[in-house]
């Protein structure tokens, strides 16, 4: 599984899983089914509304029904990604999301570029151009991603809490939290901590070690913790355990 390092606005480098070509094709297949269903519905409705004008407007109707699938394809992807946090229905079903390479959420202009170039590397080329570019580019980018400075990431990590982690959670009656300040953090923050620990345990390399170091320092500064243990993984595990005990 390809990954990408993205530095967040908090100056913390996080490793994300890139969406594979298979995932993106499956997501696009779901989107295609939705678009096709909408197209059929619109054709039925418009045919009924314009039935009395067919004799004198054959050219107009031909042009309309020729452009309708293109406009629907373009508008669907632009609308869903721009107003649903980078997720079309297909991407949401597969746990994928569009994100900028600088870690920020794409703006409307980025989504507009992606949707427009999708006509070229998706619809007009029957997806061949997009498949070639995603397969060959280091960040799994199609032409629309390259122009907008985005890529598609997996929002669902393959890592999960193991049973031993859940059983190891204590209650306030039998466990005294060391860092009560951790209640300032959100659930999303703690999921990030948990993911960083799991990735370091699975892939012990310098990149993950650096990510753990930077994350530990950032959280210590945020929570105003002066005495940070040398064992950064132990520190993060304690923060995670304290948070679960204090907020459950």
Image (cartoon, rainbow, N blue to C red):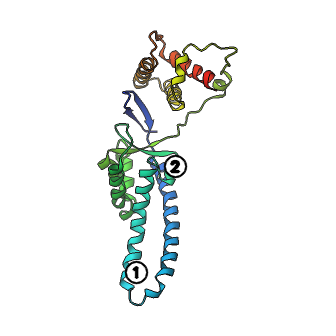
Please tell me the numbered disc located at residue 183: none
Give the residue at the far right of this rendering.
Answer: 173
Q: In front here: 187 or 230?
A: 187
Please tell me the numbered disc located at residue 61: 1
Could you tell me which secondary element the residue under label 2 belongs to?
helix
Q: Residue at x 49, y 72 (%)?
A: 42
Q: Quadrant of residue 161?
A: top right
Query: Eyeballing the image, is 92 above or below 103?
Result: below
Q: Quadrant of residue 212?
A: top left
Q: Quadrant of residue 53?
A: bottom left
Q: Residue at x 39, y 74 (%)?
A: 66
Q: In front here: 23 or 135?
A: 23
Q: In front here: 232 or 51?
A: 51
Q: Residue at x 50, y 29 (%)?
A: 189
Crowd around label 1: few <14 · some 14–19 · many ≥20 (10 Å):
some
Query: Eyeballing the image, is 144 above or below 234?
Result: below
Crowd around label 2: few <14 · some 14–19 · many ≥20 (10 Å):
some
248 horizontally vs 195: left or right: right
Quadrant housing the C terminus: top right
Could you tell me which secondary element the residue under label 1 belongs to?
helix
Where's residue 231, x and y in %?
Answer: 49, 13
Give the residue at the far bottom of this rendering.
Answer: 55
- Alpha carbon of mark 1 to alpha carbon of mark 2: how far? 35 Å
Residue where numbered disc 2 is placed: 92
Query: Eyeballing the image, is 118 above or below 192?
Result: below
Q: Nearer the viewer, mark 1 or mark 2?
A: 1
Where's residue 229, x and y in %?
Answer: 48, 10
Q: Residue at x 41, y 71 (%)?
A: 68
């Amino acid at each position: 599984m390809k990954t990408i390092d993205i530095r967040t606005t908090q100056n913390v480098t996080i490793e994300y899983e890139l969406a594979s070509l298979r995932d993106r094709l499956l997501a696009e297949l779901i989107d295609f089914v939705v678009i096709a269903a909408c197209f059929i519905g619109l054709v039925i409705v418009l045919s009924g509304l314009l039935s009395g004008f067919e004799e004198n407007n054959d050219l107009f109707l031909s042009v309309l029904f020729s452009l309708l699938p293109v406009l629907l394809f373009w508008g669907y992807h632009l609308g869903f990604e721009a107003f649903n946090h980078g997720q079309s229905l297909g991407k949401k079903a597969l746990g994928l999301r569009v994100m900028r390479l600088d870690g920020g959420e794409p703006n409307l202009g980025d989504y507009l570029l992606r949707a427009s170039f999708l006509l070229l590397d998706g619809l007009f080329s029957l997806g061949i151009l997009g498949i070639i570019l995603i397969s060959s580019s280091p960040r799994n980018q199609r032409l629309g991603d390259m122009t907008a400075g985005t890529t598609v990431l997996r929002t669902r990590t393959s890592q999960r809490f193991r049973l031993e982690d859940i059983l190891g959670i204590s209650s306030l009656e039998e466990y005294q939290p060391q860092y009560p300040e951790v209640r300032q953090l959100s659930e999303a923050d703690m999921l990030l901590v948990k993911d960083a620990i799991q990735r370091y345990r699975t892939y012990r390399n310098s990149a993950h070690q650096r990510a753990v170091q930077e994350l530990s320092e950032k959280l210590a500064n945020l929570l105003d913790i002066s005495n940070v243990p040398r064992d950064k993984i132990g520190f993060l595990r304690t923060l995670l355990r304290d948070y679960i005990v204090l907020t459950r």
